[in-house]
Amino acid sequence: MTLKSDDVRSIAHLARLHIAEDALDHYVDDLSNILALVDQMNQVDSSGVKPLSNPLDASQRLRPDEVTETDQRDKFQGIAPDVAEGLYRVPRVIE
Amino acid sequence: MSMTVTEIRRGLSNGEFSSSEITQDYLARIGRHNPALNCFISVTEDIALAQAQAADEALARGESALLTGVPLAHKDLFCTDGVRTSCASRMLDNFIAPYDATVVERIREAGAVMLGKTNMDEFAMGSSNENSWYGNVANPWNTAHVPGGSSGGSAAAVAAGLAPAATGTDTGGSIRQPAAFCGVTGIKPTYGRVSRYGMIAFASSLDQGGPFARSAEDCALLLQAMAGFDPRDSTSSNSATQDYSAGLEQGVEGLRIGLPKEYFAEGLDSRLAAVIETAIGELRKQGAEIRDISLPNTGLSIPTYYVVAMAECSSNLSRFDGVRFGHRCDNPVDLEDLYKRSRGEGFGEEVKRRILIGTYALSAGYYDAYYLKAQQLRRMIKDDFQQAFDSVDLILGPTTPEVAFAIGAKTDDPVSMYLQDIYTISLNLAGLPGMSVPVGFVDGLPVGMQLIGNYFDEALLLRVAHSYQQVSDWHLQTPGDFS
């Protein structure tokens, strides 16, 4: 699998990751090489094998839906880039 | 300064020295040697001295827990309340964690003293510790070489005697490979044995915390403090922990040890193979039965791992958005610009590469070809191990295909760096415990032997390593420049 500049641009957009235009070619090469490595997976027929997502084949543990955490808003917002009146501030979204 | 944790505990309980005294010694060594090695991102001197004093007071009252007064260091991806937790990333350079990871909490409750936070590959992504916002770490055995990664700072700190023990995490070999490269002992427990709560996530189905120390005996103590069920980690195992120190002296007589032929094939440095063979001879002399086995899908573990790890990383790292914590770009024009530039500026190159590949592998139309396929191969790799464990008690091989390489030797070729992980990553895919034990040197650089156990069989690995360490002293060697 070989990628083109436009592919990397669109993947970077999906990942919300700014990639400078002059660095694109570099990423095209690196990512294509990694995908070539990954394509080795196709040497093996795995049809019918049940996918393994948890190495112990465990399923998600559930707990009762009860409040267990206390309010620590001030502590958490103390490390935020920009807050006001208990809210996280971002650039205007709706005109 | 090459004391083991066991020796420190004995010295403290006999009153040979106080925790404050040895803590000051370690802090002084860090001050002297860290400029050359760059093992520490943060040194928490005030916390260390206060904890040491509290430990001395507890000892004076006759109160002693598992690690009372023992200084150690944490990899800088374990959250530490009130202390910067950077993950070696510009993204978290300003991140003061608002809570403790379970591992940090348990080790503190066991009485240990925190010396500081160790350097690593950014977000644990790397095999050389060259991907750190705070600069690379040098290998204490030869400072022109890498210490391995991602937990390179922890391994190098223990090797150089800047800490008697340290925590690490292992997603594809990040405890075992740096342990091998630096000549220290390290264990990656079974997936789910040590809580992931407060351990900044890279690939959630592979990540597992564990200790570095100078001996298997010390690792047993550290693991005892770290392991156990945690309701705050949704994949934490609630099976009972073992007493990891109790069976250490039982020896290896009659144990069936399997050597996978794929781990001794092309790609393994023959000089390193010879060192491993000698160590195998010692175990045979002690009564172990050595058998040849096969793990036929070993070669597939690298592509499989990189798909699983990168897909999970792209998903986990989406939380770094410049809104709630971490780096935010200057003067964003709109929300999309804020996300893109904050992430573009905050993440280093390797992290970006992995996010991009992971995003691609999970995107519409490619999911089946990549992620689903990788999960199928993952089961085949796990099944290989399960079949092997029908006829052997544990598996043995090299930890790495070569000894620590020179700084800069592989940075231009990410794929050649990934191939370094050939013997370690299949364990993470299968969720099995593994350990690296020092067994000799090639070109003045340490060689690690890997022991692989069945699920939750950490005590057996520690026992075999301990048995080997009774007849060898490779694990006690110290690098001349830092002795």
Image (tube, rainbow, N blue to C red):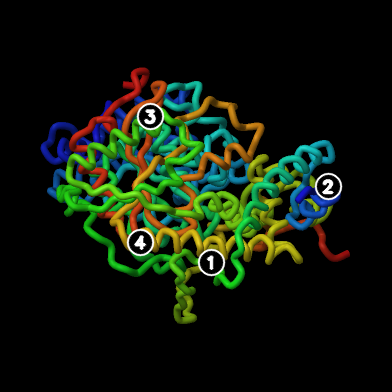
- Residue farthest right in this picture: A95
User: Compared with residue B1, is residue B400 higher up or lower down, i.e. above or below?
Assistant: below
Q: Give the labeled residue for mark 4.
A: B455
Residue B369 rendering spot, x and y as whole percentages:
69, 63
Considering the image in quadrants, where does the C terminus of chain B appear? Answer: top left
Q: Evaluate if marks 2 and 1 touch, with contact meaning CB atoms under 8 Å apart.
A: no
Mark 2 and mark 1: Cα distance apart in space: 31 Å
Q: Give the labeled residue for mark 3.
A: B446
Residue B292 rendering spot, x and y as whole percentages:
35, 49
Residue under the image location 60 percent in, 36 percent down: B133
Mark 3 lies on a secondary structure that is strand
Mark 3 and mark 1: Cα distance apart in space: 35 Å
Image position of B462 (left or right of B345): left
User: Which quadrant holds residue B56?
Assistant: top left
Q: Of the residues under marks 2 and 1, which one precedes in the sequence?
A: 2
Residue under the image location 62 percent in, 63 percent down: B373
Residue A4: numbered disc: 2
